[in-house]
Image (cartoon, rainbow, N blue to C red):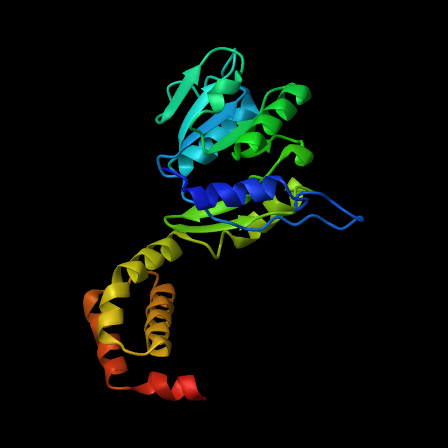
């Protein structure tokens, strides 16, 4: 994945502002930005258990990960999409990377990595060093393309884990399958249904039926919903109430 010049400019501006600083005692809140990492070259520096967790999260979203450390956790070795290099960090390792995690056991080294990333306009996460981070890893639930993420601004993993547990009954495999179904229908619905509010009503009806029945509605059900909407059926009245 290539980051275009505009994206690099935005990253550079972020690095050179105070948006990541906690000023005046205000609680820091991170902006929830979802980015595509499929086949993106990412770098994890450090080979311990924390580095292992970061690697697995990045791989969950399709990133191609290089891990550099003198010693590397057994769980990382041989993992699909992961390259292991057994040595200390070198500044040249940042070349071509779009995202870096500094997870060594040396705070000074992590800070140096962070500074070098920021100079180059590369987003960096330094484990347990908020002042050296441009982003944090949230607790998250992923079901297909549906991702719900939770952050406490780096204050308390206990809070984010609580939020994750509370939402696991909502963000289910079925929600993921229904999202995939709705995504596959977008062009068809756009072609057949002229008004945005009508299209929204179609999607909501399909979602409601799917959640109520515990399965993705079949083609005949979906076609019946579309036909009703084309005739300006009950949905229009409901929309205007």
> Which residue is most to the right?
24
Which quadrant of the figure contains the N terminus?
top left
Q: In the displayed structure, does residue 141 sit left or right of residue 105?
A: left
**x 80%, y 48%: residue:** 25
Q: Where is residue 141 in the image (x, y as percent from the top left)?
A: 48, 47
The vertical placement of 58 against 182, above or below, is above
Q: In the displayed structure, does residue 107 sit left or right of residue 226?
A: right
Q: Nearer the viewer, residue 201 or 224?
A: 201
Residue 65 visible from this viewpoint? yes
Q: In the displayed structure, does residue 39 sit left or right of residue 109?
A: left
The vertical placement of 18 against 169, above or below, is above
Q: In the displayed structure, does residue 196 sit left or right of residue 158?
A: left
Give the number of marks: 0
**x 51%, y 30%: residue:** 100
**x 66%, y 43%: residue:** 20
Q: Nearer the viewer, residue 175 or 240?
A: 240
The image quadrant of residue 113 is top right
The vertical placement of 72 against 150, above or below, is above
Residue 217 visible from this viewpoint? no
Q: Position of residue 57 (x, y in %)?
A: 47, 35
Q: Where is residue 64 in the image (x, y as percent from the top left)?
A: 38, 30
Which quadrant of the figure contains the C terminus?
bottom left
Q: Position of residue 171 (x, y in %)?
A: 46, 54
């Amino acid at each position: 994945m290539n980051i275009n010049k505009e994206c690099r400019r935005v990253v550079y501006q972020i690095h050179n502002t105070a948006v990541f600083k906690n000023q005046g005692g205000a609680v820091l809140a991170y902006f929830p930005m979802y980015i595509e990492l499929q086949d993106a070259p990412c770098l994890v520096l450090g080979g311990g258990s924390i580095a292992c967790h970061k690697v697995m999260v990045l791989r969950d979203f399709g990133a191609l990960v290089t891990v550099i450390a003198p010693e590397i956790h057994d769980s990382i070795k041989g993992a699909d999409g992961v390259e292991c290099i057994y040595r200390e960090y070198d500044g040249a390792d940042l070349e071509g990377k779009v995202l870096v995690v500094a997870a060594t056991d040396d705070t000074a080294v992590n800070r140096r990595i962070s500074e070098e990333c920021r100079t180059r306009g590369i987003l960096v996460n330094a484990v347990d060093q908020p002042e050296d981070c441009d982003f944090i890893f949230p607790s998250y639930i992923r079901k297909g393309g549906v991702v719900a993420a939770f952050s406490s601004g780096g204050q308390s993993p206990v809070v984010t884990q609580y939020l994750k547990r509370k939402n696991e009954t909502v963000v289910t495999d079925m929600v993921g399958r229904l999202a995939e179904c709705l995504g596959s229908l977008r062009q068809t619905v756009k072609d057949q249904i002229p008004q945005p509010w009508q299209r929204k009503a179609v999607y909501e009806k399909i979602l409601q039926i799917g959640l109520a029945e515990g399965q993705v509605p079949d083609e005949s059900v979906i076609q019946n919903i579309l036909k009703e909407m084309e005739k300006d059926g009950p949905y229009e009245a409901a929309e205007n109430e």
